[in-house]
Image (cartoon, rainbow, N blue to C red):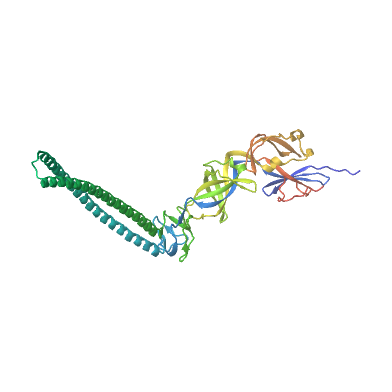
Amino acid sequence: MRKYLLLAAVVILAGSGGAYLVFGRSSGSGVTFRTEPATRGELLATVGGTGTLEPEEVIDIGTQVAGLIKEFGQGTDNKPIDYGSPVARGTVLARIDDSLYAARAEQSRALLRSAQQKVVQAKAKVDEAVANTNKARADLKQAQARANQTARDWKRSQALQAAGTIAEAEFDLSQSTYEINNAAVVVSEAAIVQAVASEADVRAAVGDAEAAVATAQAVLRQDEINLGYCVIKSDVAGTIIDRRVTIGQTVQSSFNTPSLFLIAKDLKRMKVWASVNESDIGQIRVGQPVTFSVDAYPNKIYKGSVARIRLNATNAQNVVVYTVEVTTDNPSGELLPYMTANLKFEVNRHADVLLVPNAALRYRPAANLISNGAALTDPGNATGGIVYVADGTKLRAVPVVVGLTDGTMTEIVRGDLAADAAVVVGEARGGGTPNSAENPFAPKMGGSKKQ
């Protein structure tokens, strides 16, 4: 009678990123378990996002007047203004042909001089009108004095006539003199009215002339301002990051001021405008540490922090996205405007904790491979889980309480699991297709051969 010897062996094979446990049987069927060690270390939970690098402050230089770009100025490097030119506050960036604006300003100066001369003439007429008014008042006083005197003479003549002691001719002369002088008073009063009215008119003319001067001054100021606008200067010290005009180009000024240059105030400080989904935005806080990389330097990691969370979300294809501003230092200047950044926002950090791969928490072996089958029951809550370790010829289920995760590793808060313990993360049966918990790209090991 042939006897079959059932051999059970546990073989530990080195594997990529871990090890393999091979349980063999005489039947030739083998189970290969892929394992990873539980480790102690730091766990960092992050939220990902993408964004665009921008200078921390960009000044858009435009023009207030229309005209032909005549020439460019020079940067602080004494070279013509161009992309990347360093500039100081007040640096001339460009000049617009000012011949038309200079002619307008000169015309306004001539109009102002004419208006000022009219004021002088009007004031001279006021002096003349005042003299005429004063003379009319003096003439009225003299006429009133003569009228009063002839009134008294006329009264005496009337008394003498009643007494019969005055000649008829003398009486008639007294009467006519009285009437003439009274008429002269009326004429003098009318002359005063006319003189006062004339004075008021010339004073009004002075006011009109002075108003014309003010208008001419305002027009001249505007023309001089427009003439000054023909010299386009930088309002800040910084670097030209965009030049949008060329010499000989005509720029048009309208309700929307045309943009000629973009100046970054300080390229040593940059800002990333990151897009974060609404599902993650609740974990973002101002001051939060951020790391990011750019395609130009894929092996370098840059650091920054959250400066602002913008509230004006955008909705693209039913996905709500918020813009988060991240500030970062750029002392070397290697980060350039408008680079694409891949960001990780530090949500939480736990140091010196026990860690296992997430695959270990997802793995579920067949019931006949577990030494403590009752432990197969899943805790069914967000903080509970099960991992499996070797237990002789089988696996032992270890219930654990989990904490923070970064999507690859998970913190073990509580459980009968020691550091360096080999936890099972997947299996392959007889070289077949690995189960869902196994990395499909890991080396596939065959089962043990029958002895």
Picture layout, residue 22 above or below residue 380: below
Q: Residue at x 32, y 61 (%)?
A: 110
Number of numbered discs overlaid on the protein picture = 0
Expressed as whole percent of the image width and height from the top left, the position of residue 223 reads 38, 58
Q: Does residue 138 appear anywhere in the picture?
A: no
Residue 297 appears left or right of 23: left
Give the position of the N terminus as an image quadrant.
Answer: top right
Q: Does residue 164 appear anywhere in the picture?
A: yes
Residue closest to the far front: 164
Expressed as whole percent of the image width and height from the top left, the position of residue 174 reads 13, 45
Expressed as whole percent of the image width and height from the top left, the position of residue 105 reads 36, 60
Expressed as whole percent of the image width and height from the top left, the position of residue 67 reads 44, 63
Residue 65 appears left or right of 132: right
Please name whichever residue, 25 or 192, is drawn nearer the observer in this view of the structure. Answer: 192
Q: Residue at x 47, y 65 (%)?
A: 249
Please name whichever residue, 59 or 252, is drawn nearer the observer in this view of the structure. Answer: 252
Residue 252 appears left or right of 188: right
Residue 215 appears left or right of 135: right
Picture layout, residue 71 above or below residue 218: below
Picture layout, residue 39 above or below residue 339: above
Residue closest to the far right: 1
Residue closest to the far bottom: 248
